[in-house]
Amino acid sequence: MELNSLRDLYIEELKDLYSAENQLLKALPKMAKAATAKSLKNGFEKHLKETRTHVERLKKVFAGLKTSPGNKTCKAMQGLIEEGDHVIGEDAEPEVRDAALIAAAQRVEHYEMAGYGCVRTYAKLLGYKQAEKDLQKTLDEEGATDKKLTELAQRINVKAEDPPKRPAAKKKGTKSIGKKIKEAVGLE
Ligand code: FE
Ligand code: FE
């Protein structure tokens, strides 16, 4: 990779975003599935549709530059999704898991907002008017998603603070002390 001009940097950053969006296409359905609150589930599903549009807009920008998105992997998005995956895998109260999913999703949105803010500005500086408009549209949608998540958090975080009482879930792999002792002395 050679970065000799702002245009080179612009393309590199676009490739990074292209990878990030494609990773999200795979992650968002899992996040929707893991969410308990209907509003959060719907929010993830809506953003999945928007994310498909984000990928299409990026393809259009690449076509305008007569270059391809390549197969760069956005490591930052990989890490953010991995952290979100941990949340999904935890043994958690549904309300607390929802709050954690919101936190993971907002990190993702902020990462995208930073990326799109940069490329939109580069497009403007480079005089790519249509790309500037398209990238701004995506930036606006990421911003709106972040705001929506903040709204949802206002209700969901309160519920997470005081989840309804349920019988304590038995944790996988935890044995009672009695059972451990019995096993240790060969009784079980
Ligand atoms: Fe996006
Ligand atoms: Fe997004």
Image: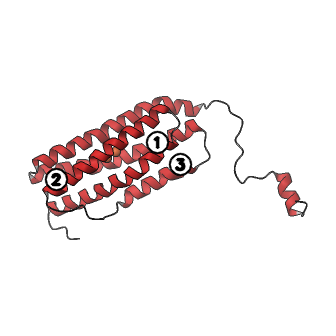
Direction from residue 118 to residue 49 in the image, left or right = right
Whether ligand 1 has any atom under 8 Å from the Cβ at mark 2 is answered as no
Say which quadrant the N terminus sits in. Answer: bottom left
Please indicate, yes or no, whether residue 162 appears anywhere in the rendered image.
Answer: yes
Q: CA distance from mark 1 to mark 3?
A: 13 Å
- Give whichever of 111, 36 is nearer the camera: 36
Tell me the residue that label 2 is attached to.
Answer: 122
Residue 44 against residue 14 in the figure, above or below: above
The percent position of residue 149, horizontal first and vertical second, equals: 41, 36
Per the model, the C-alpha gap separating discs 1 and 2 is 33 Å
Tell me the crowding category of disc 3: few under 14, some 14 to 19, or many 20 or more residues within 10 angstroms, Cα based: many
Secondary element type, mark 1: helix
The type of residue carrying mark 2 is: Tyr
Q: Amino acid at mark 3?
A: Val
What residue is at 53 percent from the left and 48 percent from the top?
87
Looking at the image, residue 94 sits to the left or right of residue 137; the answer is right
Quadrant in which the C terminus appears: bottom right
Crowding at mark 2 (Cα within 10 Å: few <14, some 14-19, many 20+): many
Give the residue number, with chain letter if any, for mark 1.
32
Residue corresponding to mark 3 = 87
- Could you tell me if the residues under marks 1 and 3 are in contact, i.e. CB atoms within 8 Å? no
Report the residue at 36% width, 45% height from top. Answer: 109
The foreground one among 60 and 163 is 60
